[in-house]
Amino acid sequence: MTNRVLGIDPGLANTGWAVLEPVSGNPEFKLIECGCLRTKITSTSAKRLNMIYDELEGLIKKYKVEAVVFESLFFAKNAKSALKVAEAIGVIKICGERNGIEVAEFTPLQVKMALVGYGRAEKEQVEEMVRNFLCLKENISPSHASDAVAVGLTYLFTNQQLT
């Protein structure tokens, strides 16, 4: 069993994703692939949410992931954009449930604590730790994909029995 996890940085316009797995017999983790799903702003929100569902389900099946994890909505300056993110989170939860896999969420504070050890860490510090944990020479781009990797790593760190 691979114990692959699909990390997600939710959003209606841009949904970052990353597939990771533990390295057998090792306290390390491997990034299989990552990217960003982009929806057309000209489409209705229902079509955009449906596209997110279809794309995530395709990733779940393609990479045979066993858990889908996402960063929860902790704070938003703009209520309208927060509602759109919340809708995307609902789609993520339903997609995981319908595919019979574990669904977990982490707050930004939990992600920062797991990766940096400090809850008020800056985004750049988190990106640097992602790069270091995966032995990468450069930061993952776009930032939505990097955020998805960070939440996936948080899940793997907090579930050490997988390794």
Image: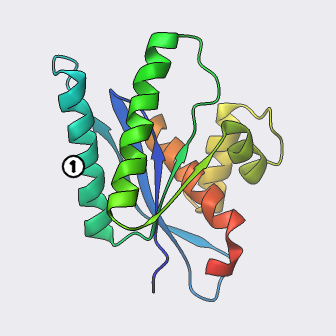
- Looking at the picture, tell me which residue is in the foreground, 94 or 30: 94
Quadrant that contains the N terminus: bottom left
Res 65 → quadrant: bottom left
- Amino acid type of disc 1? Asp
Q: Residue furthest right?
A: 118
Q: Compare residues 40 and 136 and report the one nearer the observer.
A: 40
Q: Mark 1 packing: few (<14 Cα in 10 Å), some, or many (20+)?
A: some
With respect to residue 36, does 129 lie above or below? below
Q: Is residue 63 above or below residue 45?
A: below
16 left or right of 24 in image: left
> Is 125 positioned to the left or the right of 72 in the image?
right
On the image, the x and y values in percent for residue 99 come to 33, 64
Residue 82: x, y in percent?
49, 20
Image check: 22 left or right of 116?
A: left
Q: Residue at x 23, y 31 (%)?
A: 48
How many marks the image carries: the answer is 1
- Residue lying at 39% horizontally and 31% vertically, measured from the top left: 87
Q: Residue 141 is drawn in which quadrant?
A: top left
The percent coordinates of residue 46 (x first, y second) are 22, 28
Image point (27%, 56%), residue name: 57
Would residue 139 be seen by someone viewing this image from the given angle?
Answer: no
Pinpoint residue 81: horizontal percent, then vertical percent.
45, 16
Q: Which of the colour schemes (rainbow, by chain, secondary structure, one colour) is used?
A: rainbow
Decide which of 47, 4 is in the foreground and name it: 47
Residue at image mark 1: 54
Q: Is the C terminus in the top left, top right, bottom left or bottom right quadrant?
A: bottom right
Q: Report helix, strand or loop for mark 1.
A: helix
Please name whichever residue, 153 or 31, is drawn nearer the observer in this view of the structure.
153
Residue 11, visible in the rendered structure: yes
